[in-house]
Image: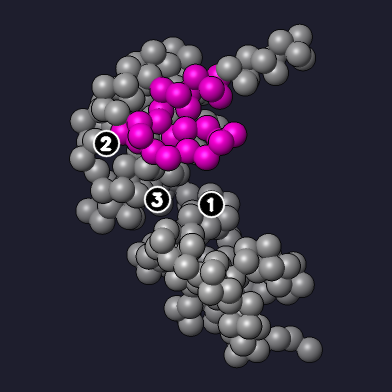
């Protein structure tokens, strides 16, 4: 017997932990459901696209996260994904929508071009996230010099989420493309974006010069071991 939206909403409500909600709300996410438990529900439900549409329509953050785990990414129309992105104001919903759905969609490149210059900085941040994906995996056709020019001119004054996405692209260029590495590091050092970001022990700083140099160091170490 298939599970209904009201039953799933009740299950999610029972899993809501006030302490987890407090932590999540500091990052803009209004839910308190442990993500491991959320993934366990998704594993039980398997892919159910119609149910995912109903869960998304509830406008509940935990329900939308569950929807993104059980949907069929290629079943969405491009305009539908655009509408969903503009509705997805919670950062975790936004991130999962881009990473778990849009990146798997056949029109991901069209959406990247549509979003990257959007007037809404949260929408534009999705375009930059998709650009970072291309920089790392399919850079053919991208003008990396132009991307670096844009980052250099706009990142320092960009709103937080757009700034973070542009910084990720800057670091990705420096990591993935040695011929642009010196310039990417120099831009990061000059702009000093996220230089003082609090970084937990054993985590890599998001400050682009440190991020680039640390990941390249790790890659070189692995290459030496393999060689």
Q: Earlier in the sequence, mark 2 or mark 1?
A: 1
**Which residue is the site of mark 2?**
155
Q: Earlier in the sequence, mark 1 or mark 3?
A: 1
**What is the quadrant of the N terminus in the image?**
bottom right
The answer for how far apart the CA atoms under marks 1 and 3 are is 9 Å
Q: Are marks 1 and 3 in contact (CB under 8 Å)?
A: no
| Quarter assignment of residue 38 | bottom right
**Magenta-colored stretch includes residue 199:** yes
Q: Eyeballing the image, is 159 above or below 186?
A: below
**Which residue is the site of mark 3?**
126
Numbered label attached to residue 38: none
Q: Eyeballing the image, is 124 above or below 186?
A: below
What is the magenta range? 193-216
The answer for how far apart the CA atoms under marks 2 and 1 are is 22 Å
- Closer to the camera, 27 or 105? 27
List x then y, in percent, for residue 33.
59, 71
For the residue labelled by badge 1, is the local secondary structure a helix, a strand or a loop? helix
Which label lies toward us, 2 or 3? Answer: 2
The answer for how far apart the CA atoms under marks 2 and 3 are is 15 Å
């Amino acid at each position: 017997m298939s599970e209904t939206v009201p039953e799933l909403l009740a299950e999610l409500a029972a899993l809501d932990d006030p302490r987890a909600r407090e932590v999540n709300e500091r990052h803009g996410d209004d839910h308190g459901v442990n993500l491991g438990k959320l993934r366990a529900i998704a594993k039980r439900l398997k892919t159910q696209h119609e149910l995912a549409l109903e869960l998304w329509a509830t406008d509940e953050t935990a329900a939308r996260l569950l929807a993104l785990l059980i949907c069929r990414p290629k079943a969405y129309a491009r305009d539908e994904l655009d509408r969903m992105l503009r509705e997805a104001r919670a950062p975790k919903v936004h991130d999962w929508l881009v990473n778990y759905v849009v990146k798997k969609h056949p029109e991901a490149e069209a959406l990247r071009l549509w979003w990257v210059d959007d007037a809404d900085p949260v929408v534009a941040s999705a375009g930059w996230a998709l650009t970072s994906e291309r920089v790392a995996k399919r850079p053919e056709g991208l003008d990396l010099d132009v991307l670096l020019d844009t980052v250099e001119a706009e990142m320092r004054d960009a709103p937080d989420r757009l700034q973070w996405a542009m910084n990720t692209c800057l670091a990705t260029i420096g990591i993935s493309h040695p011929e642009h590495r010196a310039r990417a590091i120099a831009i990061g050092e000059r702009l000093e974006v996220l230089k003082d970001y609090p970084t937990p022990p054993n985590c890599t700083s998001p400050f682009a010069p440190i991020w680039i140099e640390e990941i390249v160091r790790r890659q070189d170490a692995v290459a030496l071991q393999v060689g």
